[in-house]
Amino acid sequence: MKVRTIALSTFGSFLRNKVILLFCSLFACIVLLMMSPLLAYKAMTDASNAQQMQGFILNEVAGLMSLVSGFGSLLAAWAAADSMAGEMKSGTILAVMARPLRRWEFLAGKYLGVLLLMAVYVVAMLGVTFLLAWLGGQRFHTSLWTLLVYPMVRYAIWAAIAMFLVTLLHPVFVIGIVGILATLVQMSGSPRSGIPVWIRAPLHFALPLTGLLSEERFLVITRASLKPYPWTNHLTALAYGLDYALVWFLLAALVFQYRNLARD
Amino acid sequence: MAAPAIEFADVTKVYQRRFARVRVPALASVSFEVARGEVCAFLGPNGAGKTTGMSILMGFIYADQGRARVFGYRPGEVRAKERIGFLPENFAFYRYLNAEKLLQFHLRLSGRRVENPGALIAGLLAKVKLESYKGLKIGKYSRGMVQRLGIAQALLGDPELLVLDEPTSGLDPAGRKEVRDLILALKAEGKTIFLSSHILSEVEQICDRVIIIDRGRLVRAGALQQMLAEGNRVEIIVDQLPEDLEQAVKEQGASVERDLNRVRIAADPAQKRALAEMLWARGCDVISLTPMKSSLEEMFLKLVGGGGAE
């Protein structure tokens, strides 16, 4: 009950957060801008260039999905960091924590509030992606749940990492570190990154394998068809992601338990 | 025997800046108790460690050494917080909520089960005279209105102990009187109140006990009336005071202050008869003999030297 109260209050504050609203508006503009070349490709499509145009359209949709994923990760991290830091900086945390509420309950409520925001984001972005694909004359032949659950788990990881970091650092540093980590995740997964293997291997082990948690694994975007994966594969991948997020959340709870709650 | 409402035993807190070797001692071996049902003031100049003490009491920060307890529980424990209503200094709030919504939010967090939450909230808003502003966003409230709302949220869980950090801060004289009356009414209900304030005249009117700290150290703790009685003096005004007699008066522990055409002698009330008889016997005309009650402010300034902490 108390965790839910904090979660709903956190979610409500996000809907009024000017920074988040501004970024979401900018992102919506980018998405709308992406629609114009898509519609142009579609208008230019005829029997002679159908395959080439389809390739353009699918690349456009694939680009959007990457953008949505990258922005979502940053949004999750920012929302988690800002909601915690904002409470501490403004001092609202004092009246809240004076209530019979355990520190981990407060943190869990904040975390759930971030996940609620990300759930809305995932559903909205999925709608936009489907709309773009439909406008381009394509269809997704995949089960919806993979497109909903996989990004949620990924965002849960970034939110948990940000929540841990913000118990120690200013939120701007948190976003910087999350950005660096996300870049390292990309680089450590690729043998062509130029990073020596003795650095790449431990990084690959320590950093979240967001590639494993990417819904694009189940989506061949150029053919818009679902790759057949057994359910055990989904189960292990999702369990890995949730376990990773849980570890960071527990670390955040541990640090938060012993930190001063006085105004920063 | 029931545990005291508040217990501090050798509580020490030192702040250390991250990545720096600067250590700022905020509390040094502070010990005191507040009994149930008492109204106790926690006083000290700015930077004395009052807010640190209250933060330890609420479980917001941890003491480095010593033992702090609230109704026998560790500060920050849910069982302790269930019994506390807290008003932080400069009460901060979610600006986008209105008073009613904020109190509903805090009521849900308090875990208090009430049959009619709406009536409870309306009653509290009426108590702090905010009922006509309940729909207005708190961001548009004046400082005094925010302070009143803070008091209402502190009372929300029907607490046994109220911890009030500067409860009359930002209030006009009428508002301050209302808060004083409210505290006295809560005292009559048997609630324990632990408050900090810089307005010592108010403290004198409502508190049973006083704890004074300065630069993190306990300077004085005790029953207010007893402490004030120790500082009571009697003022004897005479027309003249020969120098040899002045010496004899001073030997009795009195102080002498000469005006243009009269002399003021301030002495312990126990000495008044002996002094008056001595003055009469030596031919001095005793113009008046007035008992002088000491004020908390005088005592406070005497104890802390009138200066804030570095």
Image (cartoon, rainbow, N blue to C red):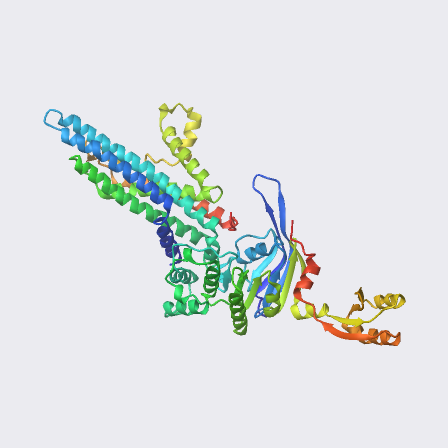
A8 or A233, which is in the foreground? A8
* Image quadrant where one finds the N terminus of chain B: bottom right
The image quadrant that residue B108 belongs to is: bottom left
Q: Is residue A84 above or below residue A139?
A: below
Which of B96 and A133 lies nearest the eye of the viewer?
A: B96
**Residue A52 appears left or right of B296:** left
Asked whether the viewer can see residue A222, the reply is: no
Residue visible at 44% across and 48% down? A86
User: Total label count?
Assistant: 0
Location of residue A146 in the rendering, given as x and y in whole percent from the top left corner = 26, 41
Q: Position of residue A218 (x, y in %)?
A: 25, 36
User: In the displayed structure, does residue A98 sit left or right of residue B118?
Assistant: right
Residue shown at the point (17%, 38%) measured from the top left: A134
> Quick one: which residue is furthest to the left in this view?
A47
Query: Percent x, y for residue A190?
Result: 35, 27
Q: Between residues A114 and A185, which one lies in front from this camera angle?
A: A114
Q: Is residue A56 above or below residue A154?
A: above
Is residue A173 at all visible to an observer of this figure?
Answer: yes
The reply, left or right, for residue B17 in relation to residue A73 is right
Residue B73 or residue B146, whichever sits in front: B146
Residue B125 coordinates in the image, percent (x, y):
42, 67
Locate residue B8: give its quadrant: bottom right
